[in-house]
Amino acid sequence: IKGHVLAFLPLEIIAVIVPTTSMCPLWTMQVVSLFRLNKLFRLSEIGTLLNQVETSVSKAGMKLPRNQLRVSKLIMVILISAHLVGCLFFMIANFNQHASGGDESAQNNWANTEGLLDAVPTCPGEAVDANTIWQRYVTAMYWAMATVTTVGYGDVTANENSTAEIIFSTFVLVIGTAIYTLVIALLEDIVAQLDVTSTLYETKLNAVELYMGMQGLPEDIKLKITAYYENLWRHQLGIKGGKILKYLPRSLRSDLLFETLSPLLQQTFFLKDCSADFVASILRTLSLELYLADDVIFQEGERGDKLSFLFRGEVDLLTSSNVKFKTVADCLLGESSFFGFEPYICTAKAATVCELFHLDMKKFLDNIRDNHLLERFASYLECNEKSLAKSKGDIVKMIKNLNSSKMAKMLNMAEIRTTPNGVILPNSAIRQAWDTAALFFLMVLVFKIPYQISFPSSDNGGGDGGGIGLGQFIVDCIIDLFFVADIYAKVALFAKMKDGVLFATPKIFRKLYFQGAGRMDIVSAVPASLVSYLMGRRGRAYGLLRLFQLVRTRHLGPYLDDAIELYATKTGKALSTAFLRIAQMFLGVLLLCHYCACIFHLIADVSSSPSNWLVEDGTAGERVGVKYLRAFYWSLYTTSTIGYGSISVISIGERLFAMATMVVGAVICDAGITAVLTSIIIRKDTQASTNNRRIQCSKSYMRSNLVNDDIRQKVLGYHSYADTQLHNIDEATVLQDLSPSLHGQVLAHFCFKPMRTTPLLEDFSDGALMSLVKLMKPYVAIPGERIVEAGKECNAIFVLQRGWCTIADSSIGSSSGMEEETVHVPIGTIVGHEVTKAREESDGCLPTFGLKIEIIEAHGVKSKNSSPYMILECGSVTCRTSIKKNLNSRWQETVVLKVVQSEVDRSGKTISITINGWRRDGAHRLLGSGQMKFGREDTELHTVSLTDAFGKRAGTVNLRVKKYKLPKHEVPTSHEQTVTAHGYCHLYRMETFEISRLRDYLSRSKQVALLHQIPLLPPCRSTPV
């Protein structure tokens, strides 16, 4: 209020009273402006007014980017500060000029040195023309901008004999340093906020990409995970819905969910007739999940322990034959199975991007128990059992009718998606290589167009003034032809991924392309270089006519992503987020300097004034390369605010552009680089500090508890492994951050096949087995750990994901520590006492025969920059060889498979041979596979032909196989085995009681009475929800 009152005072009235001559050298309007200085008190309101404008614009439906607005405010602060400082700086010089009374020895001011003031000023003097005023203002503003932004050219400076100018300049230097510090601090705050959103998202995505590389996940799962995070960023800024809901208070969370799900809650079995308090407690347990198109929400036969509220998107319901029979939206999914305590009766697959709330069975039963509603729930089930049966019966009848009709085959054929011949997938090496080439040509385009506009003469074309030469024209035509071919490839060859769905049909991805960037790409593909050259426009007009082609820079991000992916694929090394940010930042600075250099030269080149920086610098008659180098030199030291000042800035146009370059350089290049690097260093220091604290705390704990040296070394060794090899990535956290569908797909990739083939789980349907797969948890075994040990209890099953393990059976030879009795465990092997017990029961006896396989040599197998190893399989018995550092013709290794006769008979006396290549990035590449027949007393050398994944010849392997009866000391005494880790091994683990629980669940689901299907409730908690 005080500021408003002071600004309101009409002090300009004093200008009418005070004689103008007494205020020399100020004129009448200047005197009026002098007495209006109190109006500047309103400058303090700028921030508030800008916020109010931003709020009003947002209410009108226009979304303004917040961080860009904050940067704009910083630029405005710099401009206002420079304006005020420049005006005061000129005023000091003007007063000094008039105070001298025409004495040149007393005219000690910067404006007189620059020739901006009359040598003999009169008061009030003659009116000054607009051009002179403009020149004075630009020069003063130029000095102020160079000082405030700390560029400090020094070409315009305070007069060394003027005490007032020196004091004022010192003051401005201090103010400029303060403003510069403020800019850096505010930019660091902006970057910190970006770290909370986009940068944290990129960091998480980088960790996920490292995880996918370490795990060696297939490309289709990688694409889905990447698409999931892109959609999660688009919908929820990279944060899962459950975490967003946890930010809210309990009451507000339940109110929000009730408002969102009210129509569905009114249809939900049992909940629609419950009290508001109980419904609110249920709502607080819901989890929000995002599903992409084609994600499986639940599978037929899977345990129905989740009730899903579909409130956005569409879901397809499918039969066991994968035939779609219904598409639903805004409804409940799995209601009859959830409240009927039975497996799902169909498969639900997302048709579009969907958002669902899930109610977990355990949390539902906990709320029933905590609110003492068990009896009421049982009574409700008994009274309304028919409604559940009817809901289930309608779906079963629809599926039955569909399966028995000819329409099912037609629908099933319609659902099969195949990739047409010639279509290139987004993750293929060809596509990545093409986009890398496109990135190179686009960077050439981005560089050449401004260069051709500013430097039309070509040393290649016959010297200065010759225009665009033939060599440049040919290069430009090649670039134009490439981007025409790029459009054709996107129209006819390149499949498109959108919202996690792969569109491989040309008609569909062509339509999507033209709905997006297709039209602008066609416009930018017009061969402007050819048209300009044929029209004879080989000077500056040549570049101007090509200017519209820069719209292709919108593809710079996708091209760069594919180039990075190609590098990671070829080298097996992933680039960190910090490195990519620094590289992008410096590339952006270089491009900015290039464009500023071209504009700076263009201003001087088209200037009609004989005085410009080219003439002053003596480069006007030099070759184009020299001119560009000098312009780029000026641009670089200006944007970086180093400010050598060795190239003079002469004309008004040059000084205006120099001021703009100073502001952009100070905000984006100098302060921006400082802020970004500070953010990266802080993040690195935080991780390093966390690792160091973890190690120091572990050392302190072990020292205080007198832990022996062996355990101490193991603990410190694991910390070092987690830091250097795992890059501090916790697999459990990564899996938890994925959607339930992707979580299940990752686990199924490693665990489903081993669990499907073991006799222990052969009685489960695929859906029921997926219920167990989703219960598998990551497990890390340390070197020397016995994961499973014969003679000791083991209540879990394990699936080896990566690492070096060996198996020793319970024979006397193995128990005595004979090295030849151990077998290397192949990746994907399932182990555990329950697994081997089920296998023994299936075979009817323990192994009594041995297959001695002697691998002699391999020819023509290409290792593809990997270390090869061989997997040998006879029926369900498998083993692997050691990993070879390099593959020469001599393999020289012998392995023994212990088998039962029935296993040999089932395999048809055939051994399957697979050679894989191991790489440190976790990928196991198929190098070749084949089969061979063997006889009982066969000792002949067999040559096995290998084929690769495409059926092409991949080399040969020479080996001998001998079947023999095991000596007594080699025959296992029991089904139990000992599995030992010889390095850090990554496995998936599940308690065996989960298998019994699922069997009990499936058994109870077949009971006639619904009440008998209710699971036993856990004991009550002391504190109610």
Image: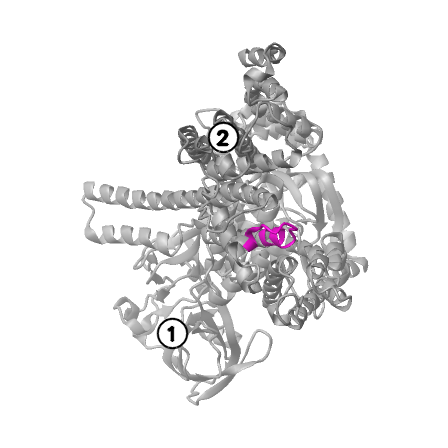
Which color scheme is applied? Answer: one colour
- Given residues 59 and 843, the one toward you in this image is 59
Query: Horizontally, is 294 left or right of 864 in the view?
Result: right
* Mark 1 lies on residue: 885
Residue 991 visible, this angle: no
Residue at 32% across / 69% down in the picture?
811
Residue 510 placement (x, y as % from top left):
75, 59
Q: Is residue 909 left or right of residue 457?
A: left
Q: Residues within 10 Å of mark 1 (few under 14, many from 20)?
A: few
| Residue 608 forms part of the magenta stretch | yes
Give the residue pinned by disc 2: 93
Residue type pointed to by label 2: Ala
Amino acid, disc 1: Lys
Which label was assigned to residue 154?
none
Depth check: give the residue in front, 612 or 192: 612
The answer to whether residue 947 is above or below residue 772 is: below
User: Of the residues tagged 2 and 1, which is closer to the observer?
Assistant: 2
Q: Position of residue 546 (x, y in %)?
A: 70, 59
Circle 2: is it few (<14), some (14-19), or many (20+) Cα within 10 Å?
many
Q: Residue at x 68, y 29 (%)?
A: 57
Q: Secondary structure at mark 2?
A: helix
Q: Which residues are magenta?
A: 599-615
